[in-house]
């Protein structure tokens, strides 16, 4: 009747998955993008830690998650037709970040991961700064 939890996931991982699923279901579009930025920073931090500890498998999974966040979340959400110069520049930035993360994975280049975190951090901060305006805007 009830599905058993996957044995490869710890209780903490299951709890985190439920938290994320619940947060996504109730989040505004603005909050969803903020969650993508936060997830990107966390994945990069995990990759850096795994790289420093020599955990190649974890490094690869974390960098893969960071690239998916950029490509399938942030970059895919850009409106290149109507978004003007900002959308085009973010598209180029996200392409560069994907290239640098791929390089970091292939060459164990922790500095490249740090560079990517440094490129996304101001976007995260700017996104957080406009949260009050986004909350006040009418829903479409």
Image (cartoon, grey):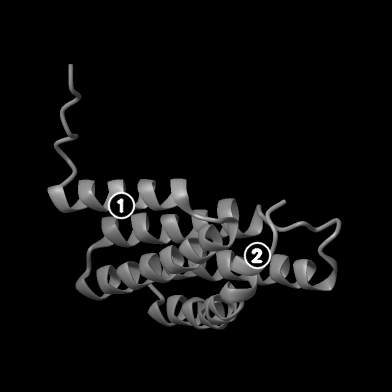
**Residue 35 vs residue 90: left or right?**
left
Q: Is residue 125 above or below residue 10?
A: below
**Residue 107 at x, y = what percent?**
42, 70
Q: Is residue 106 in view from this perspective?
A: no
Q: Is residue 97 above or below residue 25?
A: below
At x 57% / y 81%, what residue is drawn? 129
Q: Is residue 81 above or below residue 91?
A: above
Q: Is residue 11 in view from this perspective?
A: yes
At x 55% / y 56%, what residue is drawn? 28
**Residue 96 at x, y = what percent?**
63, 70
At x 40% / y 53%, what residue is drawn? 23
**Residue 118 at x, y = what percent?**
50, 83
In the image shown, does 120 or 113 lie closer to the viewer?
120
Give the SS element for disc 1.
helix
In the image shown, does 33 or 50 lie closer to the viewer?
33
Query: Disc 1 designates what residue?
Result: 19
Question: Is tag 2's residue or tag 1's residue first in the polypeptide sequence?
Answer: 1
Furthest residue in direction top, as rendered: 1
Query: Disc 2 designates what residue?
Result: 95
At x 85% / y 59%, what residue is drawn? 82
């Amino acid at each position: 009747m009830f599905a058993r939890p996957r044995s490869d996931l710890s209780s903490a991982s299951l709890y985190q998955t439920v938290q994320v699923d619940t947060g996504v279901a109730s989040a505004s579009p603005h909050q969803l993008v903020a969650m993508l930025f936060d997830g990107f920073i966390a994945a990069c931090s995990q990759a850096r830690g795994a790289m420093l500890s020599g955990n190649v498998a974890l490094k690869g999974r974390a960098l893969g998650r960071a690239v998916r966040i950029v490509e399938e979340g942030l970059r895919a959400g850009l409106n290149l037709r109507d978004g003007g110069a900002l959308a085009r520049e973010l598209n180029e930035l996200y392409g560069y970040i994907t290239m640098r993360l791929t390089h970091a994975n292939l060459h164990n280049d922790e500095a490249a991961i740090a560079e990517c975190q440094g490129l996304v951090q101001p976007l995260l901060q700017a996104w957080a700064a406009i949260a009050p305006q986004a909350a006040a805007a009418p829903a479409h």
